[in-house]
Image (cartoon, helix red, strand yellow):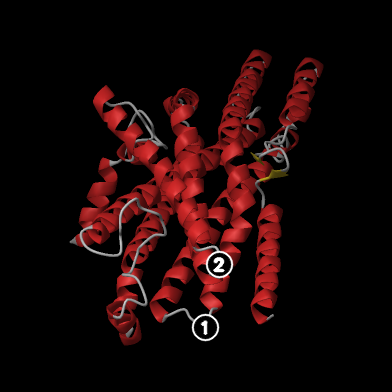
Amino acid sequence: MLFKKVITYTEQLEDPKNPLLGPTLKGLYLFGLWQTGSKFRTTVYNMIHFSTLLFVISQFVDLYFVRNDINKVLNNMSLTVLSVICFAKCYSYVMWQGEWRKLVKYISEEELIQIKKMDPNIKKHMEAYTKYTRIITYMFWVMVFITNFLLILTPFLKYATSHSYQEDIRNGVEPLPQILCSWFPFDNTKMPGYLGSIIVHVIMGSQGSGVLAVYDMNAVAIMSYLKGQMIILKEKCDRLFDEVTSTEAVLDKIKECHRHHNALIKHCSIFNSLLSPTMFLYVLMCSMTICGSVVQFTSKEATASQKLWVFQYTSGLVSQLFLYCWHSNEVTLQSKQVDRGIYSSDWWQSDVRVRKQLLLLAGKLNHPLILDAGPYTTLSVPTFIEIMKGSYSFFTLFSQMQED
């Protein structure tokens, strides 16, 4: 019964005008990134986004106050860095709203063009990458929901399971459990200030988690689209001479391959320009964040509930980074294989005029699509491995500092 309700709900997220991006666009709309509603709604969400900036500043203020306690610093940094990344994604999407809308429009138009052709092979490939995107999207959303739930629940689990912690709170040695690390202009260690701080933390944590979930899956969906369309283009090249009766028919197919490839290069260029600055910040901070989480996990002072949260948080962070690097890497690899479709076609049946056009098309298709993370690195599996190595190096350094 529950499974049927879930299926029904996911079907409601579909949009015929946006065959691939329907669910992610509705998610972006829900959290105020896709601003197509009324002016009042847009204004309210922009106020929420601005309050996110103020909250991030308050986290840095709190970091200054706890600078002498290494465990509190690590705990603060792991959450503050994530908040900074969240705000960067939110800010970039809202500020470049026009470019994102253009990209979504171009992608949906291209997919509708392919659907109208009623080609069973194209339909099969489109259904395959759409289904894959749906599975990844919904699984990631569930993981983010669980992570946010544990984030909210962990401080209270520590209070419920640790009698010594309860005694410390009663004696005034420890403050009341906090969900996030932030500074408030009022006393948040006592009622009613404590209740106010908890409400703010729940709202900020839920909004931030939602923004990360919908932004990331929108990006992954676009990367899946680029890879899937490259596969379709390769098959088009492979079938250039299937069921053709004249040279003009072959030339028309070659023109369609040129048009399709130009569209994909355009889409990838716009997407890379929108994603690259944010991913540069994300890759830069990811090593330290993962390292800080691992140090917290191995700390002797960490309780079972804290370790559960750190494990879930670190798993989510690594999964998030891996999804970007893996799918970007797949786009690059697939784009390097498109021109092979021409060489596997029956090109030898064509005359000199067609062969010249085929050579021009093959040279044009030999153009790998690469997604960048700023001006210094690319989103790829080797980049992911380097970040993991860097995290381990940071972890080793912190471990030695603690031993000293």
**Position of 197 relative to 105 (above/below):** below
Percent position (x, y) of residue 310? 47, 69
Residue 355 percent coordinates (x, y)? 78, 22
Q: Nearer the viewer, residue 395 or 103?
A: 395
396 left or right of 162 in image? right
As drawn, the label of residue 300 is 1
Q: Which mark is residue 394?
A: none
> What residue appears at the point 68 percent right and 15 percent down from the top-left corner?
247
Work out whether residue 19 or residue 329 is closer to the camera in this orientation and state it: 329
* Residue receiving disc 2: 68
- Observer-nearest of 297 and 363: 297
Quarter residue 345 falls in: top right
Horizontal placement of 43 versus 301: left or right? left
Residue 51 occupies which quadrant of the picture? top left
Tell me: 355 left or right of 369: right
Please state the horizontal and vertical placement of residue 295, each as a whole percent of the image.
Answer: 57, 72
Residue at the far bottom in the pictured view: 163
The mark that comes first in sequence, 2 or 1, is 2
Residue at 71 percent of width and 30 percent of height: 365
Q: Is residue 281 visible?
A: yes
